[in-house]
Image: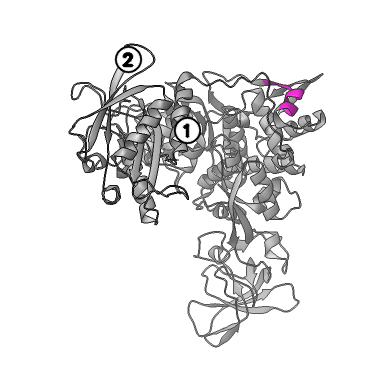
Amino acid sequence: MRAPASWLRDYCNPQLSTRDIADRLNMTGSEVGRIEHAGVPDADEFVVGKVIAAEPHPNADRLTVCEVEDGSGTARTIVCGAPNVAAGQTVAVALPGALMPNGEPLAEATLRGITSSGMILAEDEVGIGEDHAGIMVLPDDLPPGAPLAEHLPIADEVLDLEIAPNRPDCLGVYGLAREVHATTGAPLAEDPTAADVDPSDGDGGVEVEIADPDICLRFTARVFDHVTIGPSPLWLKARLTAAGQRPINNVVDITNYVMLLTAQPLHAFDLDRVRGGRILVRRARDRETMTTLDGVERTFTSEAALVCDGEGPSGIAGIMGGLVSEVSASTTRVLMESATWVGTNILRTSGRLGLRTEASTRFEKQLHPDLAMAAQRLAARLMVELCGARLLGETIDAYPRPVEPRRVGLRTARVGSLLGTEVPVGDIVAILERLGFGIDGSDGTLEALVPPWRFSDIEREVDLIEEVGRVYGLDRLPATLPARRRAVGLLTPAQRLRRRLEDALRDRGLVEAVSYSFVAPGALARLRLPEEAIRLANPLSEEHSVMRPLILPGLLDGARWNAAHGRTGARLFECAHVYPPPATEAGANPRGAVPVAEREHLAVLLAGPAEGGWRTAAPPADFHAAKGLLEAVLDAAAVEVRFERASWGRCILPCCASGTWRWERPSRSTQARWQSWRRARSTTAK
C-alpha cells in the first residue's frame, strides 16, 4: 500500500514529520517499510505563471516564444515546444535553478538564437502524470507567482506500508488517517463517504440478480447518464500517480481514487455494452472463457464467480472487468458497481488464474457489505463533479442476507489484567471511540459496537483489549511476569521418559540437534536404504521434498556442516518424529494424503575424534562407544538388555549387534539395530 503523505494529511494532520507519522503507524501495527519521494526533489523555484503573449519562433517551426508573468513584476521569456501553448493560459513554470525530477538543476538555454529563462511544464516534468503531449493548463483563478506546490502535490513523500491481512481498512488512505487520529489525537476530517447526491427522475433500466449468495454478499449498482469521458484533473492524476496507479480517464480514475481512499473497490461498465440490460452474479461453468481488460482470454473452473450480462460473462467478480463492457471515449452511460464478495472465493480464483489485482487484494481480506454503499456515495459525487454526469433513479441494491451489527462486551478490569498495567477507563473509552467503535455501558462493563471496517477481526473481548494496548502504546506497558494461578505443570509418562533419555545423552557429552522433517530424495539412496518415503505434492524445494522415514540424514547433514566449518568431531543426538510410509498396497494411498504412521525416534551420530578432558583421553567414535551410549539410554529407561552378534542388510559397515530387552511391564520385547561407522568422518563427508 502506497500512501502519499499529503493525501494522508488532508484527513488527519498531526503536525508531525512524515518520519514521525511512520513511527506512530509502526507502533500500532501498520508497518511502514520505507518512505519514498514522489515528484520533484524540491518545490522551490516552481511557480504559477500567466502567458501574456505567445508568438511563433522566428527560426523554428515547432517552437513558440512566450512572455510569461511569474509574479516578479517583469515578464519572463520562455521558449516552449508544446503544441497547445497559447496566450491567456495559466501554466506551471520552472524557474532557472529549479531541481527537476532527475535531480538536475534547470539552467537558462539559448534555443535557435533566443534565450529561454525557464520552462513551461508538462505533467511528466513534475512527476504527477505520464502525459507529455502538451503543457499543463491550470485554473485561471490561480495568481501568477504563487508557489506551485500550494496547488499541486509536485513534491510529496510516500509511505510504503505492509498491511496485515486482518486490517483491510488500512488499505485505504482514510483508514490510515483514522489510525493516525487514534494514536496522536489529531482531529480527523469528516468521512469522505458521508455525503451523497440527489438522484434524478428516471430508471436506468437494469436488473440485478445474485444467483449464488455464497459468493456475493451484496451487489449495488448505480446508473449515470450524460457522462463525458476525458482526462482527469491534475490533482486527481497527481494522487493516483503518487499512489502507484496510472491515470486512464476520469471515470476509471474515479473508481481507483475511491478504492485507494476507502479500501472498497469499484468497477465501471459502459451501460450501452451491457447486453440485455441485466446483471447476473453466478458461478462460472467449467471451462467457460472470457477476455479481460488486459486483453487476455481467461478460462475458469466452476468455482470462479462471474458478473454476467444477458449474453455471457462481463467481468471476473472482485478481480478484473471484461473487455466486452470496457469504458471508452465514446461512453455516455455508466453502470457503477460496488459489491461485497466472499474473500476466500476471490483468493482461490485469483491464485488459480495467476491474476492478483488491487481489487482482489482488498476483497480477499473480506470487506463488510456496508462499505459498498459508502463507496457508491463518494463515487457519485465525483461522477457529477468531474464527468458532468447525472445519477438516474435509486440505487439498485441486491442484499439477500443482511449482516447484523456486532456488539462485543468489555470488562475494564480485564484490560489491566491482560496488559499488565491499569489503563484508566476514560482512556479506554477515548481510544475505542477514536478507532470508530460506539461505546455504551458503565460500572466496569462496556459494550462496543464494532464499525463495519473492523468487522472481519473484532469478535471477542480480547480483540478490544488488543486495540486498547496497541494505541495506548505497547512501549508503555511494564515488563511483568504472567500471573500463575493454580497452575499445575505435569508431564506425561512419555514426556518424562523422553527427558530421561535426553539427559542421559547430554550427561555423556552429546549435543542435541534439531533437523528438518523433510529431506532430499537421494538422501536415503546415499545411505543404501530403500527409497520408500512419502513425497510432498507441492514442496518448497527439491531438497525438502520427502518426509523423513528416519532421522539419520538430518544428523549427517549436521555433521557435514560442522566438518566444513572446522569442527570434525560430532557427537549429536535427536529425538523427533519420523514418517514411515504406510503399510498399504501400491497406489492405495492417494497422492498428497497424510500418512497414517507418525512415530517418535531417538537417533545418535558419532563422527570423528571427540574432545577429551584433562583426566581422560578422547574416546574414539567406534562400535563400543555406540554400545555404551545405548546401554546408558536403556538404563535411563529401566530396560534390561542382552547383546549378541548379528548381521542385517541395513548396516553400512559390518560391525553390528542386536539387543533384546525387556521392559518392566511383562510380555513386551523388541529388537534394536545399532550401526557403527569406523570411518565416520569420511562417510559423513560423502
Residue 388 picture location, percent across and down:
59, 44
Which residue is more in the foreground, 342 or 656?
656
Horizontally, residue 119 falls left or right of residue 494, namely right
Q: Residue 412: say if magenta.
A: yes
From the viewer's perspective, tell me whether residue 140 is left or right of residue 227: right
Q: Amino acid at mark 2?
A: Arg
- The image shows residue 374, relative to residue 332, as above or below, that is above
Q: Which residue is mark 2?
A: 668
336 lies above or below 596: below
Q: Which residue is at the front of the view, 235 or 632?
A: 632
Instruction: State which tag comes first along the sequence, 2 or 1.
Output: 1
Q: Secondary structure at mark 2?
A: loop
Three-letter amino acid code at the position of disc 1: Asp
The residue indicated by pointer 1 is 503
What residue do we see at 59% from left, 62% from top?
39
Question: Dot 2, how many residues are within 10 Å of its Cα: few (below 14), some (14-19), or many (20+)?
Answer: few
Let me know if residue 357 appears in the view.
Answer: yes
* Label 2, label 1: how far apart the Cα atoms are: 24 Å
Residues drawn in magenta: 408-417
Q: Residue at x 32, y 33 (%)?
A: 300
Q: Quadrant of residue 653?
A: top left
Name the residue at the top extreme. 666
